[in-house]
């Protein structure tokens, strides 16, 4: 298989969707059955012995003894593109089809995005012994014809000594630099908070500006601080992606504003310092304006260093420059890194577009990634 055929297979799988005219395929939804049928056939054609584990991951093994797992996910976000996750699975199958000298396991995770049940990594969490045991998830497993009691059997085999994931970058860095590939050195840590600015609702026409306690105006000033801090802290990204004003009428001064906050950085100490600065800043702005603010943590996820050394030599041997980069998004590699040395290779995302129907990948970049994977498998040995 070359880059052209891999892209064709990704586009074929994109036709298996819950939403006609768009790509939407969530955890163990009906379209996943046909995806399993197609992918399982391609796995077996490549010489893999396959099975579906109790959380719905499609897995295949070729060879005996210590092995490298190559994996990614088969689910999508709503109105997705054709390559996020799926490309990595097709890459794995293509590499096994080259008959590498080492043993390989391919895992096509049934869930990574967290769309259907609001919790991500259902597929890979089972492999590291921390499965999601939500009642809705367990019901979906049964409805798919699987047995939740067998979930402990899904844990990664002791013979798996390393993990590799190919994935589109989902950002503009490689495209801006004109590079086909990137080596992921770490996955950024993430903090998510919800802040509530409390002021006083009042009539928009009769309340003088100097007597207002406008919660939305207070939140807006704080959002400016979020942008300022992130722009002046190298490597930091901070986002207010959602804001709600209450009562939400055009002729009423907002008495309450609820805002999200997402802060990410490759180094936890930098992220935590920036987060504290933003939370303190919210209190300072609110106090000066005569308002109050409260906050609640929604997520605190540590940064995950990856074994980038595992793939750098292969990138050089294949004739491509080594560009180390941080992943601002979470991936299954961060879960498997809890058990085995894990590495990731990013492929350029043209235009930096992902989680969108216009998501794409260049054929020559897929061929480059195949060349790197081939070099890696020729020389890979367990640590």
Image (spheres, grey):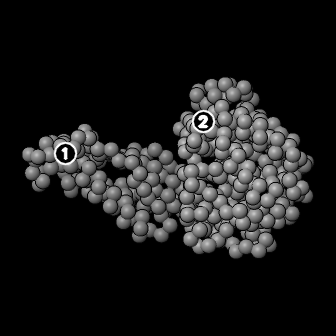
Q: What residue is at 75 percent from the left and 29 percent from the top?
A: 150
Q: Is residue 201 left or right of residue 342?
A: left
> Residue 175, percent across and down?
59, 68
Q: What residue is at 60 percent from the left and 43 percent from the top?
A: 23
> Residue 105, percent across and down?
81, 48
Which image quadrant: the N terminus?
bottom right
Q: Quick one: 188 or 33, which is closer to the camera?
A: 33
* Number of numbered discs: 2
Residue at numbered disc 1 = 253
Q: Quick one: 342 or 170, which is closer to the camera?
A: 170
Of badges 1 and 2, the one in the foreground is: 2
Element on which disc 2 rests: loop
Element on which disc 1 rests: strand
Mark identifier at residue 307? none
Q: What residue is at 33 percent from the left and 61 percent from the top?
A: 225
Residue at numbered disc 2 = 18
Marks 1 and 2 sit apart, C-alpha to C-alpha, by 42 Å
Image height of 27 relative to 204, above or below: above
Tell me if I can see residue 83 in this picture: yes
Q: Is residue 192 left or right of residue 146?
A: left
Dots 1, 2 in contact, CB < 8 A:
no
> Residue 206, percent across and down?
8, 45
Tell me if I can see residue 123 in this picture: no
Q: Quick one: 85 or 336, which is closer to the camera?
A: 85
Q: What residue is at 79 percent from the left and 59 percent from the top?
A: 2
Mark toward the start of the polypeptide (1 vs 2): 2
Q: Which image quadrant for residue 210? A: bottom left
């Amino acid at each position: 298989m070359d880059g052209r055929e891999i892209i064709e297979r990704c586009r074929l799988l994109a036709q298996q969707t819950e939403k006609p005219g768009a790509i939407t395929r969530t955890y163990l939804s009906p379209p996943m059955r046909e995806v399993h049928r197609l992918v399982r056939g391609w796995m077996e054609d490549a010489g893999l012995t396959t099975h579906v584990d109790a959380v719905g991951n499609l897995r295949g093994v070729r060879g005996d003894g210590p092995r490298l797992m190559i994996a990614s996910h088969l689910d999508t976000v709503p109105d997705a593109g054709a390559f996020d996750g799926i490309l990595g699975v097709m890459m794995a199958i293509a590499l096994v089809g080259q008959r590498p000298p080492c043993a390989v396991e391919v895992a096509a995770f049934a869930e990574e995005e967290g769309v259907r049940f609001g919790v991500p990594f259902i597929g890979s969490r089972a492999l590291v012994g921390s499965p999601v045991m939500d009642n809705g998830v367990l019901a979906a497993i049964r409805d798919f014809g699987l047995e939740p009691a067998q979930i402990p059997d899904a844990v990664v085999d002791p013979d798996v000594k390393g993990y590799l994931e190919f994935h589109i970058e989902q950002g503009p860095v490689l495209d801006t630099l004109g590079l086909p590939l990137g080596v992921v050195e770490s996955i950024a840590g993430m903090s998510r908070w919800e802040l509530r600015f409390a002021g006083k609702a009042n009539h928009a026409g009769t309340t003088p500006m100097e007597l207002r306690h406008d919660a939305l105006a207070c939140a807006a000033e704080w959002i400016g601080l979020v942008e300022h801090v992130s722009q002046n802290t190298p490597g930091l990204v901070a986002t207010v992606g959602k804001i709600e004003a209450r009562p939400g009428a055009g002729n009423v001064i907002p008495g309450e504003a609820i805002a999200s906050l997402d802060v990410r950085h490759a180094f936890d100490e930098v992220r935590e310092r920036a987060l504290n600065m933003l939370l303190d800043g919210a209190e300072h702005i609110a106090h000066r304006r005569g308002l109050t603010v409260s906050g609640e943590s929604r997520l605190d996820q540590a940064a995950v260093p990856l074994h980038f050394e595992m793939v750098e030599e292969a990138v050089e041997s294949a004739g491509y420059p080594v560009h180390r980069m941080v992943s601002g998004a979470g991936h299954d590699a961060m879960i498997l890194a809890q058990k085995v040395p894990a590495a990731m290779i990013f492929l350029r995302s043209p235009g930096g577009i992902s989680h969108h129907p216009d998501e794409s990948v260049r054929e020559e970049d897929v061929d480059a990634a195949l060349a790197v994977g081939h070099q890696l498998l020729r020389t890979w040995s367990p640590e």
